[in-house]
Image: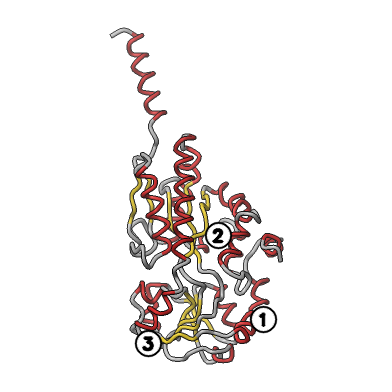
């Protein structure tokens, strides 16, 4: 075999290697059971996967927990080992605290105001300016249901004074600060331990969007829901920045268009979530529809928490400007 033939073969092999994506499939890590009816993040993930598959990019959904916990998935995304993950806001906050603005209690009027801040207000670009250098691109905020409210096992909450004798399950220190501001107590409990904590009295309730007890089978011990509309309930869809930047222009357009389709599907799904309150009642959960006066008490008590959240310097002002307040 001549040197020219060897060189020609090596050149062809190199060209093929360059032309072939490093990924055989786009892995999408789910964070809930696969329910198009009950899970907003699954609506986003499945719509995105279907769009990619329909346009020549193989995408595969991996069930919740199959690719690791929240921290493990974030690490995999940042290293380029996992292309897409439906993740919690807290994990991205470890990379850039700007995203913690999504947790500001009684700051946003509704999800439309969050979207305004993210897009017209430039907050999604601001978040990504902090996260993409660390290997993670926030594709968008994904709504998981109606605004977060107060679930309790035994005591209905009609006004802020009703929180005084409750010990609430907290996701983290930020939620503990919220409970303290409301005159209550918080105790950090991992999600897997929530049923045991509620049934043994370690915790008396939690904050979550209305669909959560239905999706996770908690209606056996959760008996009250207060529609307090604390904050739009959201998680995030994150991309590996290495993967995203490594796409061809044509494939990146497919991914961007797929994300846009997933965003629309998620927002359309959210518009129908008012029916969840009736489903809670059908499942034996009593619903308190909080009046404006009671909600105003919660909002006023929550304001000190805004400054306590781990936002970077100027972060609160940036969110305030982005929603036009």
| Residue 254, quarter of the rendered image | top left
For the point 59% across and 63% down, which residue is it?
114
Please report whichever mark, 2 or 1, sits nearer to the chain's N-terminal start: 2
User: Where does label 2 land, which residue?
Assistant: 94
| Residue 7, quarter of the rendered image | top left
The foreground one among 173 and 297 is 297
Q: CA distance from mark 3 to mark 1?
A: 32 Å
Q: Callout 2: helix, strand or loop? A: loop
The foreground one among 111 and 152 is 111
Q: Residues within 10 Å of mark 2 (few under 14, many from 20)?
A: some
Q: Position of residue 140 (x, y in %)?
A: 52, 55
Disc number placed over residue 300 in the picture, else none: 1
User: Where does label 3 land, which residue?
Assistant: 200
Nearest to the eye among marks 2 and 1: give it: 1
Q: Position of residue 249 (x, y in %)?
A: 49, 35
Nearest to the eye among marks 3 and 1: give it: 1
């Amino acid at each position: 075999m001549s040197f020219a033939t060897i060189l020609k073969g090596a050149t062809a092999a190199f060209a093929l290697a360059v032309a072939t994506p490093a990924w055989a499939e786009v892995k999408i890590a789910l964070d809930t059971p696969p329910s198009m009816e009950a899970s907003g993040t699954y609506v986003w993930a499945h719509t995105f996967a279907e769009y990619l598959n329909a346009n020549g990019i193989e995408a595969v959904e991996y069930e919740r927990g199959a690719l690791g916990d929240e921290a493990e998935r974030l690490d995999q995304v940042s290293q380029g080992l996992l292309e897409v993950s439906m993740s919690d806001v807290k994990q991205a906050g470890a990379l850039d605290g700007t995203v913690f603005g999504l947790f500001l209690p009684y700051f946003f009027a509704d999800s439309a105001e969050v979207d305004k801040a993210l897009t017209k207000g430039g907050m999604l670009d601001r978040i990504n300016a902090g996260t993409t250098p660390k290997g993670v691109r926030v594709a968008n905020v994904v709504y998981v249901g109606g605004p977060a409210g107060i679930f309790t096992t035994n005591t209905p909450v009609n006004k802020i004074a009703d929180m005084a004798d409750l010990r609430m399950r907290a996701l983290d220190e930020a939620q503990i600060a919220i409970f303290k501001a409301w005159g209550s107590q918080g105790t950090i409990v991992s999600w897997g331990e929530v049923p045991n904590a509620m049934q043994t009295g370690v915790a008396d309730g939690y904050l979550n969007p209305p669909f959560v007890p239905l999706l996770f089978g908690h209606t056996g011990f959760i008996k009250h829901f207060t529609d307090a509309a604390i904050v739009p309930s959201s998680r995030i869809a994150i991309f590996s920045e290495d993967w995203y930047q490594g796409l061809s222009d044509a494939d990146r357009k497919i991914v961007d268009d797929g994300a846009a389709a997933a965003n629309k599907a998620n927002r359309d799904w959210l518009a129908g979530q008012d029916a969840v309150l009736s489903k809670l009642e059908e499942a034996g959960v009593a619903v308190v529809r909080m009046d404006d006066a009671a909600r105003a008490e919660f909002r006023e008590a929550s304001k000190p928490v805004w400054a306590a959240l781990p936002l970077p310097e100027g972060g609160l002002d940036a969110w305030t400007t982005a929603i036009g307040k």
